[in-house]
């Protein structure tokens, strides 16, 4: 892992740092318990960050290493944002996205006279205060 100066890849079952015993093997599992899924752990801004999955799928060793390299590059370039890697951050953004779509539909209802304009203004204020 030449490009990785921060963090490591850990077994999701027994939490040991996974070290490829045989790097030529295509599918690397935990050398201690044999579990195939791993997670990334690193310290950033004094906080411990764990990444368990990519697009809802648990990491395999090679996927985790690839993303850890990406994270290290982003940290080096100064573009790293932990929110991009936390599932919670993704949820917040998808919430924000569906909220936007919902408001657009409500705008249409208001334009058709089905909804009082003041109701939407209140919702927009609430939205601004939570995002
Ligand atoms: Zn293990």
Image (cartoon, rainbow, N blue to C red):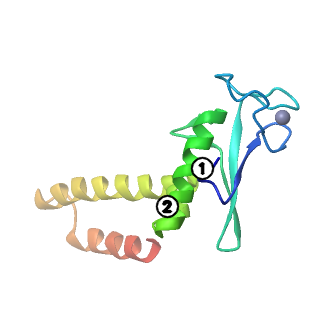
Marks 1 and 2, how far apart in space?
10 Å
User: Does 62 sit above or below residue 46?
Assistant: above
User: Does 101 sit above or below residue 13?
Assistant: below
In the rendered view, does 120 fall on the left or right side of 42? left
Along the viewing direction, whichever of 100 and 126 lies nearer the viewer: 100
Q: Residue at x 39, y 70 (%)?
A: 127
Q: Is mark 2 within 8 Å of ligand 1?
A: no
Along the viewing direction, whichever of 87 and 46 lies nearer the viewer: 46
Quadrant in the rendering for residue 75: bottom right
Q: Residue at x 64, y 22 (%)?
A: 26
Q: Residue at x 87, y 29 (%)?
A: 33
Residue 50: give x, y in percent of width and height: 68, 53
Circle 1 Cα neighbour tier, 10 Å, few/some/many (<14 / 14–19 / ≥20): many
Residue 82: give x, y in percent of width and height: 56, 62
Identify residue for label 2. Answer: 74
Which label's residue is closer to the chain start, 1 or 2? 1
Q: Element at badge 2?
A: helix
Q: Element at badge 1?
A: helix
Residue 81: give x, y in percent of width and height: 51, 64
Residue 88: give x, y in percent of width and height: 57, 55
Identify residue for label 1. Answer: 68
């Amino acid at each position: 892992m030449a490009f990785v100066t921060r963090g490591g890849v850990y077994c999701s079952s027994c939490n040991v740092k996974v070290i490829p015993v045989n790097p030529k093997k295509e599918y690397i599992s935990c050398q201690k318990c044999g579990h195939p899924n791993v997670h990334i752990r690193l310290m950033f801004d004094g906080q411990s960050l764990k990444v368990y999955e990519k697009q809802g799928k648990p990491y395999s060793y090679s996927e985790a290493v690839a993303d850890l390299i990406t994270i290290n590059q982003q940290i080096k370039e100064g573009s790293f944002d932990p929110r991009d890697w936390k599932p919670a951050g993704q949820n917040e953004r998808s919430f924000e996205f569906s909220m936007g779509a919902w408001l657009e539909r409500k705008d249409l209802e208001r334009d058709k006279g089905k909804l009082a304009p003041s109701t939407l203004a209140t919702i927009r204020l609430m939205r601004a205060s939570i995002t």
